[in-house]
Image (cartoon, rainbow, N blue to C red):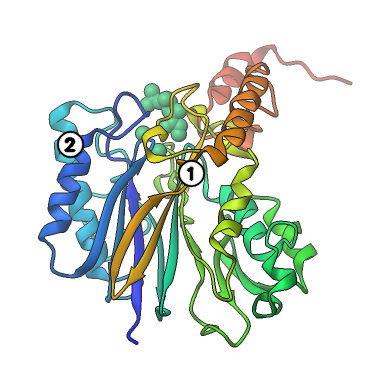
Amino acid sequence: MSKITFSIIKADVGGYPGHANVHPELIEVAQENLKKSDILEDFHVTHCGDDLELLMTHRKGEDSEEIHSLAWDTFQKATEKAKELGLYGAGQDMLSDAFSGNVKGMGPGVAEMEFTPRKAEPVVAFLMDKTEPGAFNLPIFKMFADPFNTAGLVIDPSLHNGFRFEIWDIKESKKIIMETPEEIYDILALIGAKGRFVIKRVFPKGDKLPNDEPVAAISTEKLYQIAGEYVGKDDPVALVRAQSGLPALGEVLEPFSHAFLVSGWMRGSHNGPIMPVGVKNAICTRFDGPPRAVALGFQVKDGKMNGPADLFDDPAFDPVREQSARIADYMRRHGPFEPHRLPLEDMEYTTLPGVMKNLKRRFESVD
Ligand code: F6R
Ligand code: MG
Ligand code: MG
């Protein structure tokens, strides 16, 4: 069976209104452009908050110039439409004037996985807005390494061997491969610091699946480091394969039954609870949030993306939405105080250097 690649390439090319949502006409423009292409097996265009999300299957492999070029061209056309409609921050994530073979480092976020499809291949695309790639550390760890989340780790012999985690140090641009269950304490020591260490890929270990093909992939672009100044959040996306030797669909979704805290939210500078929602509620309103997560499920067959099933559009996730709204309230009461506001070095933009400059003369030494 020949390999298939599932790619998510996303960008904020203009919000409506403010940074809340994507205008339906941008989605139409993107659909039209992808429809014209003959290099895709299938595609689905959607949004999470103000991010335009291109979900595509193809046979060109990861990092394909043709696929990245198609995505770039699509975002450019959507940017033109955003300008025409006067949308907010039109072209926000298009950080370069010219495409140079790969969208990485040019603004858009990317999660891609090339793999040999099984007879039936369930794939979940996770889309988040108003947060950062490290927001996926907790749920991905739980899916693949926490027996209190994933019953299969204990009771299914084909999951018993554990998984290999590829972890990136995004400040030093280095990566390390670590194994579960042997190294879970060391893994947690790293990925608990989610602003610095992020899970990039997960690989299987047993003999059921090819060990060199990923079963999960997460976007790790850091927009503010790319641009050298604040241009918007690097709202992340992820792909996860499920079932038959991998966490079951319900084990993949289970970490989102808890409104865990992530960094981002208003001005990319606040800690707040994640809120899993259906696409229709993936609109960032209250204090530009709270940060949202969408999960779209597909059965991939012969390159075709059968779906999506909007997996968080389900009353089973009402309690976590409620919990998230309550935590949002609690966090907001702290106003400009940490730990609601992020520590200075993690804030995406801050007036503090200006404040300090003005006050410099008035600061005296303390003996
Ligand atoms: C956070 C985000 C928003 C904006 C905020 C201010 O990632 O996109 O919270 O930071 O709405 O936006 P500007 O500076 O564009 O008015
Ligand atoms: Mg925006
Ligand atoms: Mg966004």
Residue 127: percent from left, percent from top: 44, 48
Answer with left or right where residue 162 lies relative to residue 89: right
- Point out which mark residue 25 bears: 2
Question: Label 2 sits on what residue type?
Answer: Glu
Residue 239: percent from left, percent from top: 46, 61
Q: Does the image show residue 85?
A: yes
Q: Which quadrant of the structure image shows residue 47?
A: top left
User: Residue lying farthest left?
Assistant: 36
Q: Is residue 12 above or below residue 68?
A: above
Earlier along the polypeptide chain: callout 1 or callout 2?
A: 2
**Is the residue marked by circle 1 packed among few (<14), some (14-19), or many (20+) residues within 10 Å?**
many
SS of the residue under disc 1: loop
**Is the residue marked by circle 2 packed among few (<14), some (14-19), or many (20+) residues within 10 Å?**
few
Q: Residue at x 64, y 65 (%)?
A: 144
Residue 354: percent from left, percent from top: 54, 21
User: Residue lying farthest top?
Assistant: 362
Location of mark 1 (residue): 312
Asked whether 227 or 259 is in front, the reply is 259
